[in-house]
Amino acid sequence: MSRKDGGQLMSRRRLLGVALGAVPLMMSRRKPAGRTQGETSMSRDREQEKNDRAAREGRLAARPKKQIVETGPAGLQPLGLEGQRDGLLYVPAQYRAEHPAPLALMLHGAGGDAQGGMSMLQSFADETGIILLAPASRGRTWDIILGAYGPDVSVVNRALEQTFARYAVDHKRVAVGGFSDGASYALSLGIINGDLFTHVLAFSPGLAAAAVRHGLPRFFVSHGKRDRVLPIDSCSRRLVPQLAQAGYDVRYREFDGPHTVPPEIARGAVEWFTGKRAKPQSKLTQ
């Protein structure tokens, strides 16, 4: 990960902010029969306005389905949602619709792309049965780190909705995770959408920007003691105590290393999330 990633975050670092409250969950509604074209257009405009407002608040409406209509293929595949900076989906070969699988939404660092998000846990997917979903940010990093929630929340929600419609996902095992900027975004979305995400995997985060919180997800946070991009003292050693004080269950791991994700840390996070043993990786995940 480049120094550019840390420079963006270091200039915008914020302490964790959580507040009890509720933001309306914006779900799409069916069009009533008998509407005129004008009424239909107005209804669509209202729905779009609601969806846009939810995105600005960092809220996700997508939820796992009790029953899927059509099962998608296994393997690595593009999401097909965006012409540029699209996302990736990886479905393990052993996936079966009758056995809902855990899902991890993985977010890349600044200057990265969907492959960067995917690579963090892909080597563990087949042996643990995790479906991996890795969208890409619209800009050089995630929207809230550049100033405000909005376009990236919308893309993440669309990616989740598409995946939930085609694959059976265990609603008790839905994680959001990431590295560096992606870890900051995962912390933020995890707090705001804890009624969707049951687990949060944050590898070397710099901040958490959450004005409200929903649910009570569990957190796995790791950070290198020799991290010069996002120094541990001003980042995780401040964030983790605040998460604990807010009532969250947090598993925290420090390691003797720089701004990266060591294989043993990634393996520990996967085992914590899935409850299954995972084989060691042969190289670092970055």
Image: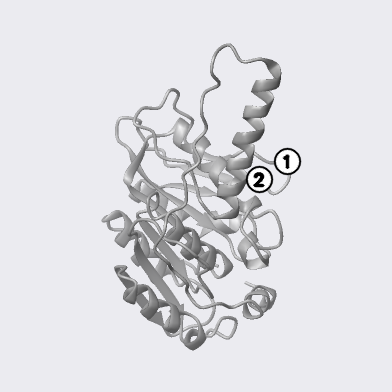
26 shown above or below 263: above
Q: CA distance from mark 1 to mark 2?
A: 6 Å
User: How was this image coloured?
Assistant: one colour
How far across and how far down the image is residue 179, in percent?
52, 67
Q: Residue at x 34, y 59 (%)?
A: 217
Q: Residue at x 66, y 21 (%)?
A: 39
Reading the image, the residue beneath label 1 is 83
Residues at marks 1 and 2 touching, judged by CB atoms closer than 8 Å: yes
Q: In front: 113, or 163?
A: 163
Task: Please give the label number shown on residue 86.
Answer: 2
Q: In front: 132, or 241?
A: 241
Q: Residue at x 48, y 83 (%)?
A: 257
Q: In front: 11, or 256?
A: 11
Question: Label 2 amino acid?
Answer: Asp
How far across and how far down the image is residue 118, in percent?
53, 54
Q: Is residue 142 visible?
A: no
92 shown above or below 41: below
Q: Is residue 211 visible?
A: yes
Q: How many marks?
A: 2
Task: Please give the label number shown on residue 279.
Answer: none
**Which element carries disc 1, helix, strand or loop?**
loop
Q: Quadrant of the N terminus?
A: bottom right
210 shown above or below 35: below
Q: Residue at x 42, y 42 (%)?
A: 92
How far across and how far down the image is residue 176, in percent?
45, 56
Q: Residues within 10 Å of mark 2 (few under 14, many from 20)?
A: some
How far across and how far down the image is residue 286, in percent?
55, 67
Question: Label 1 amino acid?
Answer: Gly
**170 relative to 15 in the view: left or right:** left
Q: Residues within 10 Å of mark 1 (few under 14, many from 20)?
A: few
